[in-house]
Image (cartoon, grey):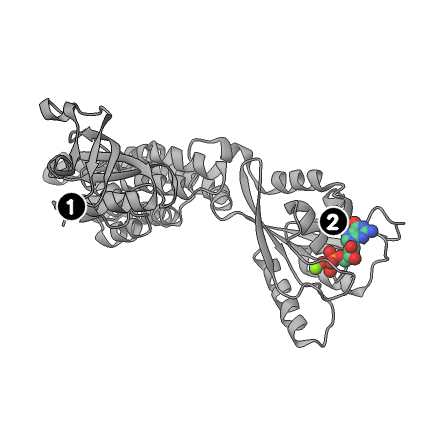
Amino acid sequence: MENKTITAISTPLGAGGISIIRLSGKDSLQIAKKCFYCKEWENKIEPRKLTLGKFNAGTFTESCMAVYFKEPFSYTGEDVVELQCHGGVLIAKGVLNTLLENGAVLAGPGEFTKRAFFNGKISLDEAEGVMDMINAESEAEIKAGYNLLQGKLHKIVLKQQNHITAMLAKIEVVLDYPENDYEESTLSEIEFKVKEIKQELNKLLETSKTGMLIKNGTRIVIVGKPNVGKSSLMNAMLEYDRAIVTNIKGTTRDIIEETYLYKGVKFVLIDTAGVRESSDVVEKIGIEKAVDSINKADIILFVLDGSESLDNDDIELLSKVIDKKYIVVVNKTDLEQKLQLPNNIDKNNVMYISASSSKGIADLKDRIYNMTINNTMLESKILITNERHIESIKEAIKYCDDVLYGIKNNNTLDLVSIDLSNVWYALGEITGDTNNEIIIDKIFKDFCVGK
Ligand SMILES: Nc1nc2c(ncn2[C@@H]2O[C@H](COP(=O)(O)OP(=O)(O)O)[C@@H](O)[C@H]2O)c(=O)[nH]1
Ligand SMILES: [Mg+2]
């Protein structure tokens, strides 16, 4: 399969200005030449030069542009031809089918990038950066994906791996010449270096807290008893009417989730059923879900109705929120205020709004941002947003601990070297150095066709 020439439509299927169809593999040019004609190509095909010509798709002719990338100076590292035709579904499919009839095979998901990986053009984490950029739902995700693609993580990982390789080489020498009696000094050198590596890895891991919020969206759960204005708050924050708002208690019965962007970061807003004693079966399930969602929140908006006094439903629910990250949102400030805030809440965490007129909503969004997103982390070059990277880093740290434990317990150099190699391998899973087929297949399976 790997040596076949692959093809796919790389742009989304639909009516548009241009569709791009790609070929990659040693027969790319030969296949393209069978259907694409232009005068310039008759003499000499100049790489990287876009040329206008005619594409014969059998049942129709298309006027299109073609460009040739000579291996290894292409995305995949192989010979690549890209055809730019008019962006119509039938045209793009017709061009694709003609290329297939002329000897190309249909590319699998992410196969172009997979070839780039196998040809050493890109590491696994950089390929994941490509994917992250394509799937990004916020500017922060694009930025994190771009840094990954640029090899920012790769460089740090490689640096640590090089330290390990140097230590392993030294161990070899010391073991080969035991008469020199360097074992003890080598062990203390390793101890020092591994502590440094562990520190670097912990720094990386630290970025994943913000990283995961960026990737998954910060989960904001809105809770409160019925009719305090939770759904109105959701609508005001989203700036459109997503949730049904009525003055009937128990209107919201299921969880409603919707995302919004603030300062280029994704937030997931979760509206819940009002929590109260209820005999209605459906409402009861909704209330259970609401209480459950409190535990999955990154931040909770605990809504109170400013025009009413506090009651037992409020106090009961507050006890579930108080030890979490929360903001008390006092709503309906446009009405006469009767609410006395309980003493046990942090007054700095109280905000006043009127959901029906959107008063105070902008400040609330800003407060949520400041309480959840670490700007320093967000601005840093590396932000770990990928669970797979987190797991590998954690594993590498665990093996660092094994090395340090071994040294402390007077393990011999050869035993220490085994744990040291394990650190190297755990890090290699990030870049793809270890050629773990299961991981590689899993990553590219999720890519789109044509990338
Ligand atoms: N006066 C006033 N009424 C509001 C405000 N926010 C919501 N309401 C009203 O309160 C009632 C309940 O609102 P809703 O959002 O459905 O509350 P939920 O049950 O907590 O989701 C509705 O009649 C809303 O129009 C507000 O800021 N001021
Ligand atoms: Mg509601």
Nearer to me, 430 or 255: 255
> Looking at the image, do the residues carrying marks 2 and 1 touch, with CB atoms under 8 Å apart?
no
In the drawing, what numbered circle is on residue 329? 2
Ligand 2 placement by image quarter: bottom right
Q: Is residue 93 above or below residue 363?
A: below
> In the picture, residue 16 is in which quadrant?
top left
Nearer to me, 176 or 421: 421
Q: Amino acid at mark 2?
A: Val
Q: Position of residue 20 (x, y in %)?
A: 29, 37
Q: Earlier in the sequence, mark 2 or mark 1?
A: 1
Foreground disc of the pair 2, 1: 1
Nearer to me, 11 or 189: 11
Write the residue at 77% across / 65% down.
Answer: 248
Q: Amino acid at mark 1?
A: Ala
Q: Position of residue 211 (x, y in %)?
A: 47, 42
In the drawing, what numbered circle is on residue 47? none
- Image quarter where the C terminus lies is top left
Write the residue at 72% across / 66% down.
Answer: 250
Q: Is residue 166 left or right of residue 148?
A: left
One can see residue 77 in this view: no
Q: Is residue 185 above or below residue 281?
A: above
Q: Position of residue 270 (x, y in %)?
A: 61, 55
Q: Is mark 2 within 8 Å of ligand 1?
A: no
Q: Residues within 10 Å of mark 1 (few under 14, many from 20)?
A: many
Q: Position of residue 118 (x, y in %)?
A: 19, 42
Q: Label 2 vs label 1: CA separation? A: 61 Å
Q: Is residue 169 left or right of residue 200?
A: left
Q: Secondary structure at mark 1?
A: loop
Q: Is mark 1 within 8 Å of ligand 2?
A: no
Q: Which residue is mark 1?
A: 104
Write the residue at 30% across / 46% down.
Answer: 90
Q: Secondary structure at mark 2?
A: strand
